Amino acid sequence: MAALSADDEESILRLPYKITYSSNLEVCTLRRSVPAPGIFLLTALLITGIAQPLWAHAILMESKPKANATVTGSELPIWLRFNVRVDGGRSRLQLIGPDGSAVSLEAAKQTAPNILESRATGLKSGAYKLHWQVLASDGHISRGEVDFTVN
Amino acid sequence: MLKLVDIFGYLSVLLRAGTLVGQSFLLGGVLFMYWIARPGKDVSADGLQRVRASTLRMFRIAAIGLVVVQLLYLYVNSAVLMATEEIGLRDVVGANFFLAGTVLLAAALLAALIAGSQGRYVPHCLSVLVVIVLAASVMTNHAAARIDGRAWLILLTSLHEASTGFWIGGLPFLLLGLYVAGDRPTQWYLTQRFSQLALVSVAVLVLSGFGMSLAYVGSWRSLIGTSYGVMLLAKIMMLAAMLALGGINFLMLRKYGPDDVVPRLRRLVEAEVGIGITIVLAAASLTSQPPAVDLVNDTVSTSHIWARFRPEWPRLSSPDATALSTRLPGQVVSPLDPTRQVITYTSEGSPLSVRLLNDRKWSEYNHHWMGLIVIAMGVLAVLARTGHAKWAENWPLLMIGIAIFIFLRGDPECWPLGPKSFWTTWADPEIFQHRAAALLCLAFAIFELRVRRNPSQGGVLPLIFPLLCAVGAALLLTHSHGNANLREEMLTELSHTPMAVLGVIAGWSRWLELRLPPEERTIPSWIWPMCFVVIGAGLLNYREI
C-alpha cells in the first residue's frame, strides 16, 4: 500500500469523502460520509453542486514495468497500453525517485494510437513511482501511477 | 493542480450534458420546423406559421445556449491541459477535442445567426449545420477513441444521438407548438406527425443503443458489476418510464378525438421532456466513464453484491462522535499508529482502522435513520391518499426531522457534537453544503405543508417541490460515478443510482398529479408515495462495511 504525503493527507481531510488508499493504477476510493436522505437531500445537490472527482476515462490496461514489479539495472524501457487512443504529444510521464525527486520523461513517437513509450535512465536502488497523465482522443484527461522497485 | 483536474471532471459532465441537450434541441428543432410543421391539408396556415416562428425562436435560443456551453467546455479543458501539461495554446489547438469542439462551436454559432435571418436557403443551411454539430459531437465521444470497430461505433453513436435528438429534442418543440398553435386541427396535425416520427426514432434509438451496449458492456457481469453498467441500467429504466408515457400518448391518439387528447397530451409531454432530459444527463455521465468492457479487474460479482446488500437489521446505534477519524488528523490506515492499524476489512477487502470502521458505522446509522424517516413519509402520504387519514397530510413535517438530523450528524466535527465553532465553519464547502441541505429541507417542509393545507392553490408554487425533486435526483445521476470504478465505489453507486431514478420518477409523477385533469390523477398520485417508501427501504439497507 502506498503511503500518502502530508500534503495529500491534508487535502484529503478537506474533501467531503473519505479516501482510503492509493494504489498503482487509479488513485483513490472515495466514499460518501454523509447520508443521502432520500430525494430531499438530492434536491440539495441542485443548489450546492457537490463536486466529486471522477476523471478516469483512459484506463491503463497493461504496463512494462508491471505494477509493483521489481526490476534491475540503471536503465528501463517504459511501455504503457491504454484502452483508448491517447494523444502522445499532449500526455505526460513523470518518474518519482526514492528520494522524492521528480523527473519528466519524454514520450517516444507513438507506435500505436493506444501505446505510450519512454525510457528511464540513471536509476538507483529504491522504490519508484511512474505518474502518467494522458489526453484521450475524445478529450478526456486521465491520470494514474505505476509503482515499481529497482534492485 | 490535480484538484483542478478533478473538479473539472465533474464540471465536464455537466458541460457535456449541456452539449448533448443543446445538440438534441437543435436536431429536434430543425426536424420539427421543416418536417413536422410543414404545410398540410386541412391545417390553418396561420396556425402553422405561428408554430414555425416560435420553433425558430426556441431553436435560436438553443443554439446560443450550445455556443455558451461549448465555449466553456473548450476554455476549461484547454486551461487544465495547458496548466497540467505545461504546454502552450498553440499545442492545445491541435488536439482532437479542440478541433472537434471548435467545429461544433462554429456550427452552433452560425446556426444561431442564420436562424435569425430570412431566406430561401435558411432551412438547407440550418440542416447542414445541425449535421455538422452532430458529427463534431460524435468525434468527442467514446466511439472516436476506440481501437477496435471504430467506424461501426461512430455510425451507431451517430444514429443513437440523431434519434435521441429527433425524439427527445423534438418534444419541447411539440409542447411549444401545442401552446402556440391556437386551434385544435393544427394541434392534432402536429401531434399525429410527431407520433409517427417518434415511433421510428425510438426504434432506431433502441437498436443502436443495443449495438453500443454489446460493444461497451459486453457481458451480464459487466452490466451489473460496473458503474458504467449500472448507469446504463438507470438509463434503460428511465427510457422504460418515458416509453410508458409515450405508449399512453400513442394509444390515446388512436382511440380518442382531438378534444379529449390534446389537453392530456400536453401534461404528459411535460413529464416526457423532463425524463428525456434526465436520460441525456445520464448519457453525458456515461460518456465520461470508461466503458464497462475495459474494466477487466474492477468488476463486482453478484456474490459481492449479495454480500453487501443482503437484508440485515438496520444499525440503530451509533459510535460516539469523538471516535471518528475527523477528530484525528490523518485517516489513512497506517501500521505505525495504533488508531490507524488495520482491524478489519470491508466485504471488498478494503482495510479499516478503528476510526475508519467507526466512520462507516456512523454513516450507516445516518442512512438507516433517514430511511426510516423517508419510509414514514411515504406511508403517511399513502394513508393521506386513501382519504381516510386527514392527519397524515402533515407528512411534510417529517422533513423538519431530516433537516435537524443533517444539521446534527452531517458534520460531527462541528458544534454541537464537535469542537469546531458553528460560525467559523461556514466557509468550509462541505459543511456549507450540509447546512444548505438542512435549510432546504426546512423550507420544503414549510412550503409543502402549505400546499397540503390548501390543495386548491394554483400557480407555479406547488410545482416547485416536484421539479426540484426530479432535478436533484437527475443531478445525483450525473455526479454519481466513481474515480476508476473501483469496487467499493461501485457498490456505493449500486445503492444510490436506483434511488436517483426513483427520485426522478417520484418528481414527475407528483408533477403529473398536479397538472393532469382531476379525473386522470389517480395513478400518478399513488406512484410517488410508493417511490418514497422504496427509496426509504433502499436507505435502510444501505451498508458500507
Image (tube, coloured by chain):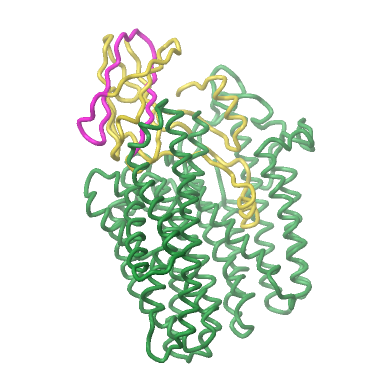
Q: Residue at x 44, y 28 (%)?
A: B84
To which quarter of the image does residue B87 belong? top left
Q: In the shown orientation, is residue B400 left or right of residue B59?
A: right
Quadrant occupied by the C terminus of chain B:
top right
Q: In the shown orientation, is residue A139 left or right of residue B464?
A: left
User: Where residue B379 appears, x then y in whole percent?
Assistant: 67, 67
Tell whether position A129 is magenta: yes
**Residue B155 can be seen in this image:** yes
Q: In the shown orientation, is residue B499 left or right of residue B34?
A: right
Numbered marks: total: 0
**Residue B234 can be seen in this image:** no
Q: Which stretch is magenta?
A: A108-136
Q: Residue at x 32, y 60 (%)?
A: B131
User: Where residue B193 appears, x then y in whole percent?
Assistant: 39, 80
Q: Residue at x 30, y 62 (%)?
A: B159
User: Where residue B521 appears, x then y in whole percent?
Assistant: 61, 80
Whether B44 is drawn above or below A97: the answer is: below
User: Where residue B373 appears, x then y in whole percent?
Assistant: 69, 57
Q: Colour of chain B?
A: green
Q: Colour of chain A?
A: yellow
Which of the two residues, B231 or B335, is positioned nearer the viewer here? Answer: B231
Tell whether position B71 is magenta: no
Q: Residue at x 35, y 59 (%)?
A: B129
Which of the two residues, B121 or B261, is positioned nearer the viewer here? Answer: B121
**In the image, farthest residue toward the left:** A111
Whether B396 is drawn above or below B94: the answer is: below
